[in-house]
Image (cartoon, rainbow, N blue to C red):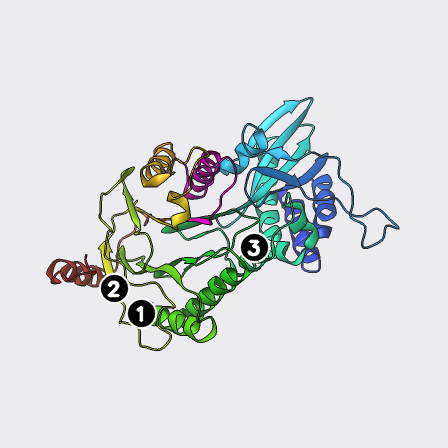
Amino acid sequence: MDDADFGRLLAGLLSDAHRCGLDDLPALVTAAARSMGLLEAVIYLADIQQTRLMPLPPPLPDGASPLQEAMDDRPALAMDGTLAGWAYRTESLRLASSGDLVIWLPLVDGIERMGVLRLTAPALDAAALEQCKTLASLIGQFVFSKIDTSDTALRSVRTRPMALQAELAWAFMPPRTIGSHCVTSSAVLEPAYEIGGDAFDHTVTATTLHLSVIDAMGHDLASGLCAAVALAGCRSTRRSGGSLADITEAVDGALNRWLPDRLLTAVFADLDLRTGTLTWVNCGHPSPLLIRHQHVVPESLQRSAQLPLGLNPHGTRTPSVMHHAQLEPGDRILLHTDGVTEARSAGGELFGEDRLVDTIVRATAAGDAAPEALRRLVRTILDHHDGRLTDDATILLAEWHPPATSHPSERDRAHIAKHRAAATSRPPRTGSST
């Protein structure tokens, strides 16, 4: 297909997609693929635990009831040990030939991995392969924008029913991976189908990455409600221009007013993307970890934690203490809940912080991007615990990677100098450090 015809194909696909639900996407993609001279196109989505790739169900046959789901005899594909999984895990294409040529392409939106696209063709030249990559890029964005509106698609990425508290928790969770040209943040949460009180949040602007990791007391529906209130309080305050101190005050006040018998631990953090200055507040939570040059910098972010939130039903909370640290390009920040390190094997052995650090360092040394490093880590945790966790385990990994060729403006250089001067001149005090 020449460039002009391909351009018209994409324009038509974009136009049709505006009024197309995700259930209609397989038929739309198949039609586009055949117009390109391809034999077949199949969309696979990663299941919620990122262990398998599940085929998106094909369209309903003519005359079928709207309540009847289409049957698909294509099997799910393992994430590890398959070409499809390799394309997903590495976010790069994979080719295979068994008569016809099979192309596996990752489906991503920005840097959030969604699944893979399987295309079959009698043959491909370099120009046609580039068109296939463009098609996959467009489909990834379609999937991301429509998946939450289709129960068919959401059922297809689940391997068993989800508990009520987990359904509540996932409804409030952001995408697992976000980022920009200078920062990446990725998170995982287990047990995916029974989570109760854990939650995470991250958001990025032109100048700031915000991170939150929350661990509410208990493992029931009320715990999920507590975590949801904390996320809502954090977002409402942040979007109104509030500081980290304002966030802790807002969440604490909301818990004391509406859920007076509940408490939670949390870390709320902001990373200045211009300077690499990390600022955070710790409310009874495990300390963040700093990974630099594939090693954890011992005690670099170790600070005294304040009391958990929700402990002041009749009083005023002590003002939050802000902690500060200066990052270097390439540094990674690891936030986690205690369910990660306190996971026990059948023999009673704790997973522990050393094993957590070792697993992450090995993954980063192997060149894994943050999303894949966390996927491997959570599999290691589950294997340690014989596949079942008794407590929620949440891990968030953020990397600051400003472009090496970027040159800060005079204003940014002044901003960096100001922060570095403050970091060296600030008098030490309990609970606050640079």
Question: Residue 216 at x, y = what percent?
Answer: 44, 59
Point out the image quarter for the N terminus.
top right
Q: Rounded to the nearest whole Å, what is the CA distance between mark 1 and mark 3?
A: 29 Å
What secondary structure is found at the residue carrying circle 2?
Answer: loop
Q: Earlier in the sequence, mark 1 or mark 2?
A: 1
Q: In this view, does 401 lie above or below 229?
A: above
Question: Residue 319 at x, y = what percent?
Answer: 26, 71
**Closer to the camera, 339 or 313?**
313
> For the magenta stretch, what is the residue range?
367-395
Q: Nearer the viewer, mark 2 or mark 3?
A: 3
Q: Name the residue under label 2.
A: 322
Do callouts 1 and 2 mark residues in contact (Cβ within 8 Å)? yes
Q: Residues within 10 Å of mark 1 (few under 14, many from 20)?
A: some
**Residue sitting at x 70%, y 41%:** 33
Q: Earlier in the sequence, mark 1 or mark 3?
A: 3
| Left or right of 156 on screen, residue 364 | left
What amino acid is labelled 3 in the image?
Ala
Q: Name the residue under label 3.
A: 166
Residue lying at the far right of the rendered structure: 63
What amino acid is labelled 2 in the image?
Met
Q: Name the residue under label 1.
A: 245
Q: How crowded is mark 2: few (under 14 residues within 10 Å), some or many (20 or more)?
A: some
Question: Residue 208 at x, y = what percent?
Answer: 35, 61
Q: Rounded to the nearest whole Å, what is the CA distance between mark 1 and mark 2?
A: 8 Å
